[in-house]
Image (cartoon, rainbow, N blue to C red):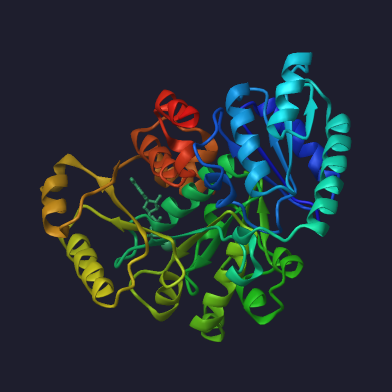
Amino acid sequence: MSRFAVITADTDFEHRVRLAAAALPGSLQYFQANFLPASIEDVFDQLVGEPIEVLVLGPDLRSEDVFTFAAAVDARHPHVSVIYAAQPTPELALSAMRSGVRDIVIPAADAEALRSHLEQAASAAASRLAVAPVPSTLDAESGGSHGRIIAVMSPKGGVGKTTIATNIAVGLGKIAPMSVVIVDLDLQFGDVASGLMLNPERTIVDAVGGPMDSLSLKTYLSAHPTNIYALCAPRNPADADRISPDQVAELVKHLAVEFQYVVIDTSPGLGEHVLATLDQATDVVWVCGMDIPSVRGLKSGLEILNELHMLPEHRHVVLNMADKRAGISVQDVEATLGVPVDIVLPRSRSLPLSTNRGVPALQDGLRDPAVKGLRKLVERFKPQWDSREHKQLHRRAVFQ
Ligand SMILES: Nc1ncnc2c1ncn2[C@@H]1O[C@H](COP(=O)(O)OP(=O)(O)O)[C@@H](O)[C@H]1O
Ligand SMILES: [Mg+2]
């Protein structure tokens, strides 16, 4: 199977690459950025699925950065074909080839031309791979690369978990189209399907009962128009009993191999399914309402998980339905929790409307302070190098 990645912020070019890759076997991973990271591993570490064969660098990247980057790819992952989209002047072509760029395409190339470049580059990569060992970062022993697993949790119900989880998924779908899956682990009363206006044919009950290879997994998912997938909760609450925590853990592990982001909506509290998820999660989003029981509940939740050493690597505390008239302040909440609040989402009139319409606020592009907060939350999950604001600083680092 071929495997493609593209780095660019040029959406038109990205669209043509996507069309080109769609005509070939293997998946495409998209990094939306108009600059390159200081280390190539910042890209390679984010790759999921089958080993990469072709890396396409967009026309909006600086050529000096591309050459430095291509040279590093050539040294560390020599089988990978780097394709650069640029006007091929003789000087540029020479520097490009010397640095390790394997092919140049003109930025205006249409999807058909790009497809042929991708195909050639992939077959060249495959033959280089056949004679060279697979690099250690893609070692089968380490289980390959894994996507980020983001669990959205709270001790209490009705605080906005599903709203936040669906919006995170939709927001990430713009960064990584077709590489985001939202899983509804509120097994009895899940409402991700309703929040996304989906009428799933198959649900998590089918998924845990069947084979979990890459092809079978996709058949359990429902596709959403925002380029994300959803694995919905059982239609019958009684079916929740047929799903064990171990099955949930296994399922999440498999999904993380296939997807760049696995967003998990959960039921309130620290039930066994939620704990099984936490064990796998790279990120947890704690949702807390602006009332004393909610804040206290979260404080004890954090304490318990800390004692059990079950706190995932990245923590994001969201204070939802924030309201000046609540009688407590953000500072009061932080003082009680003992950890900072990362995102404050004000009480909003549009969010309940979007829940009822089944169209997440980030899909609608609503203008609302809470929606702005949701966007900020999504930013926290972008690849680290991609979210850097100091591009100049970063460029200096490349040339050191
Ligand atoms: N910031 C907010 N302001 C106003 N209403 C909100 C806000 N966040 C969520 N809601 C609404 O609160 C209700 C419960 O939210 P939901 O996401 O279903 O919570 P949970 O999944 O934690 O039970 C929904 O109708 C939702 O639209
Ligand atoms: Mg919910």
Give percent across and percent down for residue 171: 51, 43
Write down the quadrant of residue 10 in the picture. Answer: top right
Question: Is residue 151 or residue 327 the one in the foreground?
Answer: 151
Give percent across and percent down for residue 189: 47, 70
Give percent across and percent down for residue 22: 81, 44
Left or right placement of residue 335 versus residue 69 in this view:
left
Write down the quadrant of residue 103 in the picture. Answer: top right
Left or right placement of residue 142 versus residue 14 in this view:
left
Q: Residue at x 46, y 54 (%)?
A: 165
Left or right placement of residue 139 versus residue 192 in this view:
right
Question: Is residue 194 or residue 120 the one in the foreground?
Answer: 120
Question: Is residue 306 or residue 327 the one in the foreground?
Answer: 306
Q: Residue at x 43, y 23 (%)?
A: 392
Residue 399 position (above or below residue 358): above
Give percent across and percent down for residue 51: 70, 56
Left or right placement of residue 122 versus residue 398 in this view:
right
Residue 25 position (above or below residue 209): above
Number of numbered tags placed on the structure image: 0
